[in-house]
Image (spheres, rainbow, N blue to C red):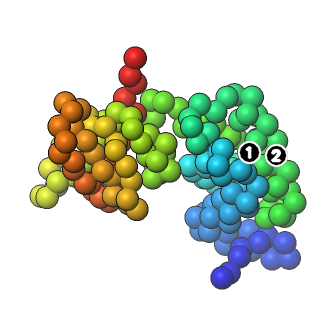
Amino acid sequence: MTHFFYLGQGINGLKALLNHPEDLENRILQIFENKIDISVYGIDLVRVRRTNSKIMVSVLMDRVDGGITLGECAGWNKRFRGYLEEAALTPQPCEVEVASPGIDRPFKTLNQCRRAIGKKIELVMVLDGGVEEKAVWRLAELRGSILVLENEKGSPERHEVSWDSVRSVRAVVEF
């Protein structure tokens, strides 16, 4: 497996990395996931972008049981910055921003769905012919990339939806 490092590759190496940010994002995700307790925290998304002379690394993370605090985000921000400096992936320190996905944001990953098992979700899926259908379900379980859904009215009937056919999914707040 090839790892992409800035160290020793000069400015052309950095440009190559930034032209393929998914490679850099995957490498950063590996570093971060090796440093967190995955039974407590999950990283949903790592994005890298260049702004003028800075490299910005945005991380969406949450507690496995949901509800990461602002203080925890600030603490991880500092630790992640240190991990990036140790790894020497870029010629200058990166700006790091760590945030919670937020309850009102659509899920971007199956990890976010995993934390919603047993809860109500609003799902927009694409049916055959490109027609979209929107419905509220209870997420019963995940089987790989298949969402197993239960009807809200207590029916024992279950539906299976492939993650590939999901246009958007978000948590429904229950009181």
Work out which quarter of the rendered image holds the N terminus and state it.
bottom right
Q: Secondary structure at mark 1?
A: strand
Q: Residues within 10 Å of mark 2 (few under 14, many from 20)?
A: some
Q: Secondary structure at mark 2?
A: helix
Query: Would you call the spot at circle 1 few (<14 residues within 10 Å), some (14-19), or many (20 or more)?
Result: many
**119 sits left or right of 160 in the view:** right
Determine the residue located farthest toward the front in the rendered image: 156
Against 78, residue 34 (above or below) is below
Give how far across and how far down residue 91 sits, in percent: 84, 62
In this rendering, the answer to whether 79 lies above or below 73 is below
Horizontally, residue 123 falls left or right of residue 86, namely left
Q: Of residues 163 and 51, which is closer to you in this image? A: 163
* Position of residue 150 in the picture relative to residue 40 (left or right): left
Badge 2 amino acid:
Arg
Res. 135 in view = no
Q: Does residue 94 lie above or below 77 as drawn?
A: below
In the rendered structure, the answer to whether residue 127 lies left or right of residue 146 reads: left
Q: Measure how far apart labels 1 and 2 are at the Cα level.
A: 10 Å
Whole-percent x, y for residue 5 in the image: 77, 72
Q: For the C terminus, give its image quadrant.
A: top left
**Nearer the viewer's eye, disc 1 or disc 2?**
2
Q: Nearer the viewer, residue 110 or 38?
A: 38
Which residue is painted at 33% across and 52% down in the image?
Answer: 147
Residue indicated by mark 2: 79
Residue drawn 45% across and 52% down?
110
Q: Between residues 85 and 74, which one lies in front from this camera angle?
A: 74
- The residue labelled by disc 1 is 96
Name which residue type carries label 1: Val
* Residue 57, percent from left and from top: 68, 50
